[in-house]
Amino acid sequence: MDLGRIRTLEALPEEEAAGRIQAERDRFGKNLCVLAHLYQRKKITELADFVGDSYGLSKSAASFDGGKYIVFCGVRFMAESAAILARPEQVVLHPDPEAGCPMADMASLDEVRRSWNSLSRLSGTTVPVTYMNSTADIKAFCGERGGTICTSSNASKTFEWAFQQGKRIFFLPDEHLGRNTALKYGIDPEEIVVWDPEKTDGGEPESYEEAKVILWRGYCPVHQKFTVRDVEHVRRFYPKAQIIVHPEVPAEIVQIADAVGSTDYIRKYVAKTKPGDQIFIGTEINLVQNLASQYPDRLIQKLHRSLCLTMYQITMGRLLYTLENLETLERVVVPEEVRHFSRVALDRMLSLTAV
Ligand code: 13P
Ligand code: SF4
């Protein structure tokens, strides 16, 4: 990547960059598909072919039948998932290969393997389930061991699938999504325990045998920031407001919010509110701002300002640079042995939750 050129493109006025991005899109026509996560800058979402949460985008990537080039505006694990689901003749490009997800990086394959080996001493069967926000090798790890993947919009269905088979879940890497999903499913809090890879034997060796869900100690720095005080503050000054949060926030906040759901759930929730309504949202700031500008006739506010810095690394300039260099830029490549089993896990997820 030519960083000097990227900087020049990043300095362009937004409308000029948008015009040039559109010109590139016209040049490639059906050969190009731009996917954008809902946390992307507004202008990028306006220029994309598909905009959605990580579940919706993985379905779009799996079913997209035209197009040689898929450009993924989001973080690395999302672009990797698109590469896993793409057909052999398709290529996936990520406008900033350095834009990873800090939570996904909290579970390395070595640590997970070591932990899994320790857990293999437990009686009964344990199934590994990873959140989509994980690296491709963790997805493959789960696929190879009969496990699956979930996103924040289908986590409940995945838990149901595992529990119907009478299995204990080893959930990676987001402690909060795992706990919130287990609690929603009605699991006794005593049977939900944490595995801390930095502690000897996970830190709570006496509790794993009876556990129904073992949670990897990982978190999203963006969603971890929300606090009970944020909610209390809104309740005090905006008593009529509805508070909605993403399931990556800690459970004590979910318990006092009015609604909880994935990025797409939040989008649909807001779409159903009425003019004059007051809605405070506990999730990434770009989504909140995009919804606020889409519905100027209601008060849509952040619960607390929290920006995903790596999502924000995808700029209009980088998108334009990627489109101008589609044929020559480095592709997102997932090695075949990793691709195979991560595809197994992704297909299992898509079939479990097909609607
Ligand atoms: P969604 O599954 O809601 O798209 O969330 C992805 C994400 O990165 C949230 O932090
Ligand atoms: Fe990762 Fe959190 Fe950013 Fe989502 S918001 S990409 S989980 S760091």
Image (cartoon, rainbow, N blue to C red):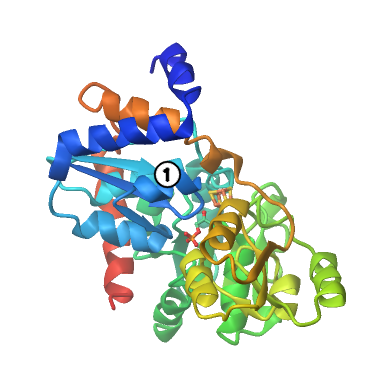
Please give the name of the residue rendered at 62% of the width and 73% of the height, measured from the top-left corner: 180
Residue 88: image location, x then y, percent: 14, 42
> Where is the N terminus found, in terms of image quarters?
top left
> Where is the C terminus found, in terms of image quarters?
bottom left
Circle 1 residues within 10 Å: few <14, some 14–19, many ≥20:
many
Residue 292: image location, x then y, percent: 59, 61
Residue 271: image location, x then y, percent: 49, 74
Question: Looking at the rendering, which quadrant does residue 346 occupy?
Answer: bottom left
114 relative position to 51: left or right:
right
333 relative position to 185: left or right:
left
Position above or below: 57 against 314: below
Circle count: 1
Q: Which residue position holds label 1? A: 44
Question: Looking at the rendering, which quadrant does residue 259 occupy?
Answer: bottom right
321 relative position to 307: left or right:
left
Please give the name of the residue rendered at 60% of the width and 40% of the height, measured from the top-left corner: 309
In the image shown, does 158 or 285 lie closer to the viewer?
285
Residue 66: image location, x then y, percent: 13, 50
Camera sees residue 60: yes
- Identify which amino acid the numbered label 1 is placed on: Ile
Camera sees residue 68: no
